[in-house]
Amino acid sequence: MKNGPNMTHPRIVSLLEDIRQLSEERFLLVQALRQLVLDLDPDVFEEVKYGGLLFSAGKPFCGVFAYAKHVSLEFGNGAALPDEHGVLEGTGKLRRHIKLGTTHDIEQKHVLHYLTLALRALDGHAKRG
């Protein structure tokens, strides 16, 4: 289901409120990441899965998960992404993540660049920009 600004699913609202109760800073960081991801392409939609927000455009390409001291932007196929800025963490066969502590980290760790790469890497997704 596509979620526009006025069409947020109740499960998403509930998760966001839970995050806000634990930490306003984490909530603001999750909201900033959500906006970046949803603005990537009109085909992007979000759902609550695995305890966080999973974003898809036909297929899943990233997730946002709030933890006690940070927010993690996860890429299911992140090992295949070029890491020219050296910010991807993880050593598994497929997954990589970017650990974020504040909204300032979004720019410092080139999050939009990696989100764009992950979206473009989806099979059959139009190459944009």
Image (cartoon, rainbow, N blue to C red):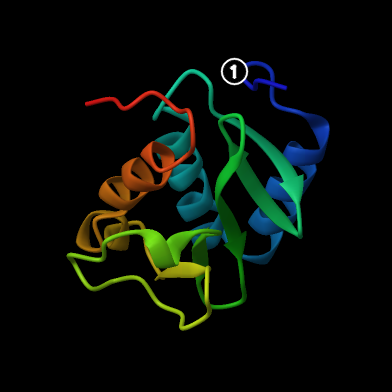
Question: In the picture shown, does residue 67 fall above or below 115?
Answer: below
Query: Mark 1 Cα within 10 Å, few/some/many (few <14, many 20+)?
Result: few
Quadrant of image for the C terminus: top left
Residue at numbered disc 1? 4
* Residue 69 placement (x, y as % from top left): 53, 78
Which residue sits at x=37%, y=37%?
A: 120
Which residue sits at x=61%, y=38%?
A: 59
> Furthest-left residue in view?
84
Question: In the picture shown, does residue 48 fall above or below 20?
Answer: above
Observer-nearest residue: 78 or 63? 78
Quadrant of image for the N terminus: top right
Secondary structure of the residue carrying numbered label 1: loop
* Residue 99 placement (x, y as % from top left): 43, 71
Which residue sits at x=23%, y=54%?
A: 107
Residue 103 location, quadrant: bottom left
* Residue 105 placement (x, y as % from top left): 30, 63
Residue 41 horizontal side relative to residue 31, left or right = left
Observer-nearest residue: 54 or 127? 127
Residue 3 location, quadrant: top right
Which residue sits at x=60%, y=64%?
A: 66
Residue 70 horizontal side relative to residue 120, left or right = right
Residue 126 horizontal side relative to residue 7, left or right = left
Question: In the picture shown, does residue 43 fall above or below 72?
Answer: above
Instruction: Please state the total of marks drawn on the protein image.
Output: 1
Task: Give the residue type that dot 1 points to.
Answer: Gly
> Furthest-bottom residue in view?
91
Observer-nearest residue: 43 or 105? 43
* Residue 15 placement (x, y as % from top left): 75, 49
